[in-house]
């Protein structure tokens, strides 16, 4: 019957009951509520989809609509899909392609690190101009500019050094200075 309670412990330390609209497992005693299992699973009400699974000495998996979205691994976590912000769902970090990372803001991909180490800004695929460029900025309008500003009260301005190695690693000749 609704509102009938199974009560355990002294007084009302632990209760299991149904209120007529919700089911409850209620621990109000001292100490913690412990559930011991070597393979703990939480399913939906129809008992046909995972919601959570925790394996002893193994992973903890979280599911959305029966699809695994997050699981713990030995050295961190794995996610399926993108890493989104709760209050800004069109800004996220995602796996754009195999071994590629993308940052999206306002629903548009703004930056990508490719599988061969290129940093792409305002573009989703790399191109070669004269040689393979590691840093690329591309656009079809005025947004393709690069600005370097140094905010300082001294006489030194912003600078870029272009160098080329003519020997081993760490030795180079400055091609343009100032």
Image (spheres, grey):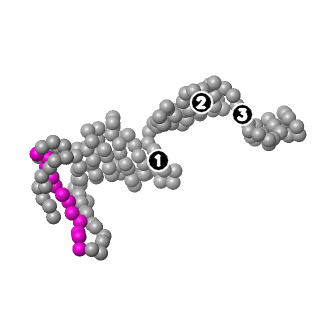
Residue 147 occupies which quadrant of the picture? Answer: bottom left
Mark 2 = which residue? 54
Q: Residues within 10 Å of mark 1 (few under 14, many from 20)?
A: some
Residue 103 within the magenta-colored segment of the rendering: no
Q: Which mark is residue 84?
A: 1
Q: Residues within 10 Å of mark 3 (few under 14, many from 20)?
A: few
Quadrant of the image for the N terminus? top right
Q: Is residue 18 left or right of residue 82?
A: right
Q: Label the magenta part by its dominant secondary structure.
A: loop
Say if mark 3 contacts mark 2, CB within 8 Å. no
Q: Is residue 20 visible?
A: no
- Say which residue appears at 63% left-offset and 24% top-offset: 38
- Say which residue appears at 85% left-offset and 35% top-offset: 9
Residue 177 occupies which quadrant of the picture? Answer: bottom left
Question: x, y percentage for residue 85?
Answer: 48, 50
Question: x, y percentage for residue 109?
Answer: 34, 49
Which contiguous range is marked in magenta? 155-166
In this rendering, which labeled residue sits more in front, label 1 or label 2?
2
Q: CA distance from mark 1 to mark 3?
A: 32 Å
Q: CA distance from mark 1 to mark 2?
A: 24 Å
Mark 3 = which residue? 34
């Amino acid at each position: 019957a609704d509102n009938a309670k199974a009560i355990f412990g002294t007084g009302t330390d632990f209760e299991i009951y149904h209120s007529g609209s919700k089911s409850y497992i209620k621990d109000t005693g001292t100490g913690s509520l412990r559930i011991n299992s070597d393979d703990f699973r939480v399913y939906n009400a129809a008992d046909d989809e995972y919601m959570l699974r925790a394996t002893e000495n193994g992973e903890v998996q979280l599911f959305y609509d029966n699809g695994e979205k997050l699981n713990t691994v030995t050295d961190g976590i794995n996610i399926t899909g993108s890493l989104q912000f709760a209050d800004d769902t069109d800004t996220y970090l995602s796996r754009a392609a195999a071994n590629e990372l993308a940052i999206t803001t306002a629903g548009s991909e703004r930056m990508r690190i490719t599988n061969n180490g290129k940093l792409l800004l305002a573009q989703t695929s790399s191109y070669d101009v004269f040689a393979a460029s590691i840093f690329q900025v591309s656009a079809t309008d005025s947004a393709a500019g690069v600005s370097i500003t140094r905010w300082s009260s001294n006489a030194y301005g912003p600078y870029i050094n272009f160098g080329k190695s003519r020997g081993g690693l760490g030795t180079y000749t400055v091609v343009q200075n100032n």
